[in-house]
Image (cartoon, helix red, strand yellow):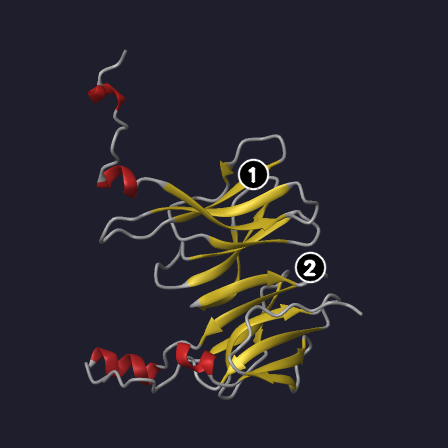
Amino acid sequence: MPSNEEAKPSELGFEEIADQLYPADPRISPDGKTVAFTVTARSRKGEHPERAIWLSRVGEPARRFSGGESDDREASFSPNGTTLALLSNRKDPKKSAIYLLPLDGGEAQRLGDLDGDLSRLEWASDGKTLAVIRVDPETDAEKKRKEEKDDPDVFEEDFKFARLWLVDAESGKARCLTWAARNVWNYAWQPDSSGLVYVSTSQNTINSLFTTATLWYVPASGGLARQVAEFSPAPGSPVVREV
């Protein structure tokens, strides 16, 4: 029989824990045969965080699909199932951009010039447009103040609002759908791609989610948003269903 010493399970050290891979954010392809998800390791202090997109296809082992040397995230399948859109900071560690990656192989190609603090990337059902939330970038005056160290941090002032943007899937041309003092937290496409609903608050702080939030409808073609309802606290992810 093995000794008590031999029967003890091995203990994981800090290095082994840091090297463990963690899957998250699964997305299912339109045909239900492929799952895209992110895989990341617990980065050590001072290391540049890295995240890769992996694919799990029916009958095949999961494998890494994107480079893994940058922060690749928020994979979104095109409606026809041929292309994966994702956010990545591969060109600039401080900014994300939209990339398209063919599912049958090939290099990821950047889509358009829109970059910055991007999140919640989603295709429209017609495959012609992608929606994404973008935080307003710093102005030239704000950058200058930072360089001159004349930029006091005032609590809950100088808001940077998150806006809803649409990006043409072919040309990469981007346009902003929201403006004024509205911080967009989440949104959903209409099933026919003709419009979107989004949740906003008048500030961009977490505390604002516990005050009054507004649900809006805006046409994908642009124009004035129409208020649908108000909630307190703010709702989570909206879903639009055909009736």
Earlier-in-chain disc, 2 versus 1: 1
Q: Nearer the viewer, residue 177 or 235?
A: 235
Residue 108 is at least partly visible in this image: yes
Residue 127's disc is 2
Residue 205 is at least partly visible in this image: no
Left or right, residue 198 beside residue 117: right
Q: Nearer the viewer, residue 140 or 28?
A: 28
Category of crowding for the residue at label 2, using alpha-carbon neighbours closer than 10 angstroms: few (below 14), some (14–19), many (at least 20): some
Element on which disc 1 rests: strand
Q: Which residue is painted at 69% across and 77% down in the image?
A: 221
Q: Which residue is painted at 27% across and 21% down in the image?
A: 7
Vertical relation: 239 (above or below) 17: below
Q: Which residue is painted at 51% across and 84% down in the image?
A: 182
Q: Which residue is painted at 69% across and 54% down in the image?
A: 79
The quarter holding residue 206 reads bottom left
Q: Position of residue 163 (x, y in %)?
A: 51, 77
Q: Nearer the viewer, residue 87 or 55?
A: 55
The quarter holding residue 223 reads bottom right
Q: Which residue is mark 1?
A: 56
Q: Position of residue 114 (x, y in %)?
A: 49, 68
Left or right, residue 95 beside residue 215: left
